[in-house]
Amino acid sequence: MARSPQKFGRLLTAAVHNIRISDERSLKKTVRVVQDELGYALGRHGGSSIEYWRKGNIPATIDDLENLTRELVKRNGLGSDETLQLLNYAGHPQPSGFWAELFPLQQEFASFVVGPPITHPRQFFGREAELKRIFNLCKRFPLQNVAVIGCHRSGKSSLLHYLQSITTTAPNELRPGQQCNWLPQPEQFQWVMVDFQDVRMGRRERLLRYLLSRLNLPVPDPCSLTNFMDTVSHQLQTPTMILMDEIGAGLASPELDQQFWWSLRALSGNYTEGKLGFVLTAHEAPARVAHEYGKPSPFFNIFGHTLRLKPLSEAAARELLATSSRPFNPTDVEWILTHSRRWPVLLQILGDTCLTAQESGETGHGWRDEGLQRIAPYHYLFEAPC
Amino acid sequence: MLNSSYTDGPDLHPNLMLGCLHLLFWLVFHPAAWRHFVARIDPDLSPSFTLTDLNRRQWATPALWRVFVQGFFILPLLVGLATGLTLWFAGATPSAIVTPATYTIFLSLAIGLMIAATVGVAAGLVSGLLVGLAVGVIGSSDIFGDIGEAVAVSTAMGVAIGAGLSIAGDLADRSRQQSEPGRTTLAGAAVGMLIGAIVAGILVGIGATTLIQLGLTAIANLAIGLSENTAYWLSRTIIVSGAFGLAVGWQSGLKPGLIAAIVGGLAYGLPVIGIQTQFFEQGGFLFETELAIGVASGLLFGTSFGVVVVLPYALAERLAGAWAGAWAGALGSLGRHIFRNQIPLWPALPLGFVGVSLGVLMAWGRPVVLYPLLAAWNLILFRLDERRTGHRASLLRRHSAFWDEQQRLPLSGLDEHLLLVLDRYPAEGEAALAYISQSRQRWAAQVVQLELEARRLESVEQVADVGQVHHHLASGALTGPTSALLRQFSQISQDVEAALNQAAAYPQRLALSAVDDRLSALIRELTVSSDPFVDRFRPIATQWQRLVGRQRQELADAIEKSQEIDNPYVVGVPLTDQQEIFVGRVDIVARIEQLLLDRRRPPLLLYGQRRMGKTSLLRNLGRMLPRATVPLFVDGQRIALATDYPDLLYNLAAVISQSAERERQLVLPPLSRDALAASPFTCFNEWLDTVEVMLERSGYTIALLALDEFEALGAVLDKGRFDVSDFLSLLRHTIQHRPRFKVMLTGSHALEEFQQWASYLINVQVVRIGYLARDETRQLIEQPTPDFALQYEPAASQRVFDLTRGHPALVQLLCYEIVTLKNEQDTVVRRRVGQADVEAAALNALAGGTFFFADIQQNQLNATALVLLRAMAAHGAGAVIERTELAKLVPDTAELEQSLALLLQRDLIEAVDAGYRFQVELIRRWFELATSESISE
């Protein structure tokens, strides 16, 4: 949609009239009064600027445009579609982004998530001990490094996603009573997630650029390891935890050589005043993986804390099942707890199976057979530690 | 009952006779009740209404007629009765009683009606009664003698008419207060107005009386052709008629004035005719004659007396208000009485004036005069109430505070009586308190309210009650310092509520601390205050402070219980000089310092196993070495990133500069990458020259180039990216030709393992860094930070040492797990560490410290050494394995020798007698577990 000052003016005029007729109280106001109120809300001395903009003059600064739009939306002058139109007509550089900010999606969460890792904190359950340990390590300098070991599908990635987002998620987006005050000043903390299963993360320069951009640091040219070290060691001020998911995939990458891992160790230990820490996940001891790939790096020596993921506590498992959109009967809950052995992925699968059966009106225990079939591939979780 | 007892609007007694007395009582003691009574009859009717104010509708109101009957029929009858009784007691015969009694009845009626028509019905009721009683009772008494009686009557009449008219003044005042509630008159101005009213009233009274006298004379003189007697009575009739008409007309207009003139003329004229024509004597019986004479003379005296009241009143009231009217009317009547009856001026005039003054000032004087009696009455009521039991109603309603609204003097004991009733009959007490708070005795309400608030404040038993009490406080109902005090208590209560609403214990405690401070300030304030209420409230403030203090202590205990022990241990990351947890190594630093002073300038090798604290020591050298030494920390990993010589030397210069600035705030000159490009080594040496000069100028004698992780650099050099000899030559040249520069390598490998390094670095002095000493370890275990909260049993501390042998990384690891473990335990046992805790934490350390142990297994040993180590681990703690037994596992002697040498070199085992054993129990346990199953993964 092209920039159009005239259409902007017309839409703004309509918005002002919408505000006036939005409720009975406003109806008694003249357009001039509505304009004045808008002007005052924007920190001006009256409504002359609104009058000026209505004549087809687009606000001079992005801030003015955004503040104006925000006020119009707040006062019911603009609906969702009109807002996007207004931003487009005004030539806003990122209309969709700002529009999304004004009209956040009202997410509806599925009761059970089968397959992908849990990315929204609301759907994450348990692991209090692990979280407590990791967040406690974040509360003082130097930041210490943690390795999370667990089998495939034991919840490692979900844990990292949770670490990344729980402290900054608004309480109203969480479950009632869900703890989020793990850190005293979470906004002063940075979390950067690196998923080594993403092949792009196996490319050294790409990875370094990604890290710098996520750390809001300038990307040097060339983005060599030396320059990366210089940039981070000189400019990193914010306490930062880098979350490395599936380190094995990273170690397998030829470009992420021994020097690369040494550099990360040097950064953590000697050049960031303790402001940089790592949390990595692996399905087996990384030192062994590193050895297998011929990269016996001292990097792994800095991981003084190893957490091995186990099944959820019974309370957490019950809490997970209790979030079903249709309540399960107690015998089904007990059956799921027994057969999942409280592994989160199995709880999700069996819960989903049970819920689907309920929603399709099935009675009886037929869903249990299906559930057992679905969790059969994950029986390795029941065996000795990975 | 409460509704009629504690109100200004009580019901009139239904009995006609008692009701009229009730009305009189209201008018004298409780004018507000009269006001409410009149308002109930007709809301449009003023309390001080006159007969001429009434419209037709009001004239038709039965309730009003009831009042008239009571006031102008029953009351005069009562006056006549009183007169008759007085005469009867004096021994008069019945026939001698009839005329005086009838006389006073009609006198009372005439005066009452005339005053009711001009001054007000209320004043008319009272005046008629009182004048009638003054004339009838006192005049009938035979105790004063003729002159004395005349003087007494004139005085009593002065009192009576003054008191009656003062009702009008009082009602007028009240009406003004009602219509202008916000208006207040300053005390000085009020006194001024009163004096003005008195003077105006006296002047008008004298003037009007004189005027009437002059009028009488003038009219009499004009009566040409009439007999003297006829002229006399006619002139009087005209004057009475005219004066009354003038008074009413002056007040209410021409028509009422004319009617009043006719009525007044008839009321005076007809009795005159009757008497002059001897109609009554000729009419029949003596009794009838006596009666008729009484009626006629009563009307004559009443009207002639009334007119000298109402005309001055009307004139003065217009000029200066009701009080002036009261004075004028009263003085007018006094003057008329004295002059008309030719009573000696002395002492009649001054006594009469005193009587008038007493009457007019009745509203002020009566409360004072009656105070002792009322106090006694009220005390009796209080004592009776104290003794009352059961559900019998209290006698508080009889207390004068509820029926004598004129009483301005504080009625002592009322507050106690109120509190007594509040305790026993709360509803009645509340009603009484509400009434009193609006009355002239509101001081008692204030005192009671304050006491009630004090009781409310002191009734709290828990701090939660303190937080709720402000919802019920009535600080606004009080005034002055008490209100300010209650506001302080209220504010403190609100603060307590806010504090208790805090979600967590810690902010609760903080907020309560602030409350505690406020209470302390309040107590100090109350201590130095001289206000009378402080003795009542200081103990309450103290009580509150005690409750708050107790709550704070409970919170502190709760916080203490829930407070996790701060975990200061750092695992896996080198300690910088910012971490106070770095302990020991003083002997090693002393050794380094000594070697740095060696004239031979030997290169140093800080040798120790991985995680033994080499890097941590280097990072702490800055604060441990003398200031004249600049430690230049060079991380081998960092410079190993170089891709070529310029890059290598650039990195080296960069890390040297960073280190110099960090350790000694010494800013070294920059070295650009471009400058290095052409001739890197030459350029670097020139830079070192500059640095050396700068060091000398800055007073630094030694620059310790500490090359950490030299193996990392060695690995790069070994890969052929650089010519090793070039870099090593640089190092050697620096050592040999730059006396201020000392070189120290650190690593976990002996220099011999890097042969080229060994050939360039001659006479390397090895400084070994090993386990922490026992006392250093104990410090790290028991007091890693000054405020560390854990206490170790001696055996537990020893157990940590036994398990770790003072290996710094393992001590940190195990102690971290101990703190974590203790934080999960009940607070009762949280702060004390026993051996069992150490053992439990050791298991966690084996799992949590996997990387440390796995590194040994994966990266530091060969397969044969691993076999030997696992075999030795299986023998248990402290076991010594003989060499022969190990030889069974590795038959090849050379291989066995080589592996044992490796294990010894890595400080994993130690030779003991004829065999070997693990150096560190915790490492042995890990290998034991790893051999059996899982952890090694």
Image (cartoon, coloured by chain):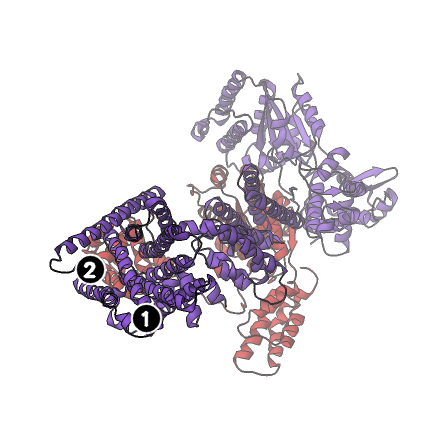
Mark 2 and mark 1 on one chain: yes
The colour chain A appears in is red
Q: Which mark is residue B289?
A: 1
Q: Secondary structure at mark 1?
A: helix
On screen, B728 above or below B165?
above
Is A20 placed left or right of A364 in the picture?
A: left
Q: Nearer the viewer, residue A215 or B258?
A: B258
Is B540 placed left or right of B180 in the picture?
A: right
Q: Residue at x 76, y 47 (%)?
A: B838
In the rendered structure, which amino acid carries the disc numbered 1? Thr
Is A240 placed left or right of B606 in the picture?
A: left
Q: Residue at x 69, y 41 (%)?
A: B809
Chain painted purple: B
> Mark 2 sits on what residue?
B229
Q: Secondary structure at mark 2?
A: helix
In the rendered structure, which amino acid carries the disc numbered 2? Asn
Q: Which mark is residue A135?
A: none
On screen, A10 above or below B764?
below
Q: Position of residue A322 (x, y in %)?
A: 58, 70
Q: Chain of mark 1?
A: B
| Res. B345 in view | yes
